[in-house]
Image (spheres, rainbow, N blue to C red):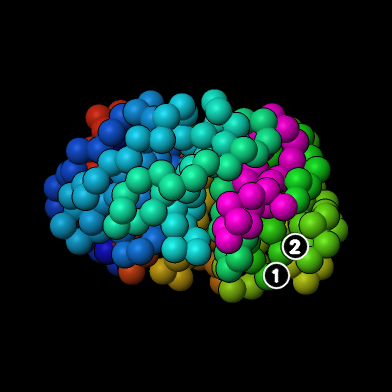
């Protein structure tokens, strides 16, 4: 199964076929998604909150107010981490307790966020930097200069990958050195990045394409034509998924062939994706619901 948040709706799309199965109301402006602690976390920029959704019953468990403009969420070290673009901080939210346990000051206009074992990585869109948070101390332990207007961040292959929307590049950060060790030219306005078992994938918002990067050579080995203005990207269930904002579609890319194998009409302005247990969740602004839709 798969799930998708569209036009404020969250549509659940079965990745191998299925049918529309209903909808769940969520706070306005769903903008970021992550899976953790067995639930779906939804950052809502207009509501200033993050919600936990039961992926089986498709109901909102609780909504935690974080304030400001939360744009993205990641789960790591037993907590959800939510960027607050208007307050230049990241909120740590504890599951079960369902409250903000700490707030960490980062760079200017934090947007995308990723987490791995022992670190949380924050792309500061207006600060041209990435902040590294130590989840043990809840403190920034490194600030790494990257390209202009970093818009996406992901972890894979022992590195951190940053899509720099302002200069058409992806920066590769070595976590051990806390520095950029490679800069890779991609398409126009790269907006999101993710990884599979053998590659790093970048959505180029203004080029209508997704770039495949070989992490062994730090070069682009394929450029895949997708829909108009691809802004969100994720990997899971044997595929790379891309949300095309101006087409109101989600495309499925086969990593083995680097080709789009299916395009699904969703709702208005799909802007965030997450995959778990055969379910693809797509976030978009609109009616503020989580819906399930079969492909």
Residue 102: x percent and y percent? 49, 45
Report whether 69 appears left or right of 105. left
Label 1 neighbour load within 10 Å: few <14, some 14-19, many 20+: few
If the image is split into quadrants, where does the C terminus sit?
Answer: bottom left
Q: Which residue is mark 1?
A: 158
Q: Quadrant of the rendered structure where residue 160 is? A: bottom right
Residue 130: x percent and y percent? 71, 45
Front position in the image: 118 or 129? 118
Q: Specify start and end residues of the magenta stretch as a single range.
A: 121-141
* Residue 100 included in the magenta stretch of the image: no
Residue 149: x percent and y percent? 70, 34
Q: Are marks 1 and 2 in contact (CB under 8 Å)?
A: yes
Q: Quadrant of the rendered structure where residue 31 is? A: top left
Kindly tell me whether residue 219 is visible in this rendering: no
Residue 193: x percent and y percent? 61, 52
**Residue positioned 36% across, 50% down in the render:** 41
Front position in the image: 166 or 255? 166
Q: Give the mark nearest the N terminus, 1 or 2.
A: 1
If the image is split into quadrants, where does the N terminus sit?
Answer: bottom left
Q: Which residue is mark 2?
A: 175
**Residue positioned 83% across, 55% down in the render:** 179
| Secondary structure mostly taken by the magenta-highlighted segment of the chain | strand
């Amino acid at each position: 199964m798969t799930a998708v948040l569209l036009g404020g709706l969250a549509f659940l799309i079965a990745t191998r076929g299925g049918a529309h199965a209903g909808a769940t109301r969520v706070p306005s402006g769903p903008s970021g998604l992550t899976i953790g602690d067995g639930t779906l976390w939804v950052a809502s920029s207009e509501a200033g909150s993050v919600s936990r959704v039961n992926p089986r019953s498709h109901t909102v468990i609780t909504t935690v107010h974080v304030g400001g403009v939360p744009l993205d969420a990641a789960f790591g070290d037993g907590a959800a981490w939510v960027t607050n673009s208007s307050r230049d901080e990241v909120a740590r939210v504890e599951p079960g307790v369902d409250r903000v346990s700490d707030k960490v000051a980062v760079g200017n206009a934090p947007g995308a966020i990723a987490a791995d074992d022992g670190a949380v990585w924050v792309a500061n869109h207006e600060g041209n930097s990435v902040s590294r948070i130590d989840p043990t101390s809840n403190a920034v332990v490194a600030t790494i200069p990257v390209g202009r207007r970093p818009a996406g961040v992901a972890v894979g292959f022992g590195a951190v990958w940053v899509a720099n929307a302002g200069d058409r590049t992806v920066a590769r950060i070595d976590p051990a050195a806390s520095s950029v060790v490679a800069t890779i030219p991609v398409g126009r306005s790269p907006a999101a990045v993710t990884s599979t078992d053998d590659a790093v994938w970048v959505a180029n918002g203004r080029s209508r394409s997704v770039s495949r990067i070989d992490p062994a050579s730090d070069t682009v080995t394929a450029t895949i034509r997708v829909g108009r203005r691809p802004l969100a990207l994720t990997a899971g269930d044997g595929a790379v998924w891309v949300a095309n904002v101006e087409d109101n579609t989600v495309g499925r890319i086969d990593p083995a062939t680097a080709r789009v194998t299916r395009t699904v009409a969703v709702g208005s302005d799909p802007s965030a994706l997450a995959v778990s247990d055969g379910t693809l969740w797509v976030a978009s602004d609109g009616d503020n619901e989580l819906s399930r839709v079969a492909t």
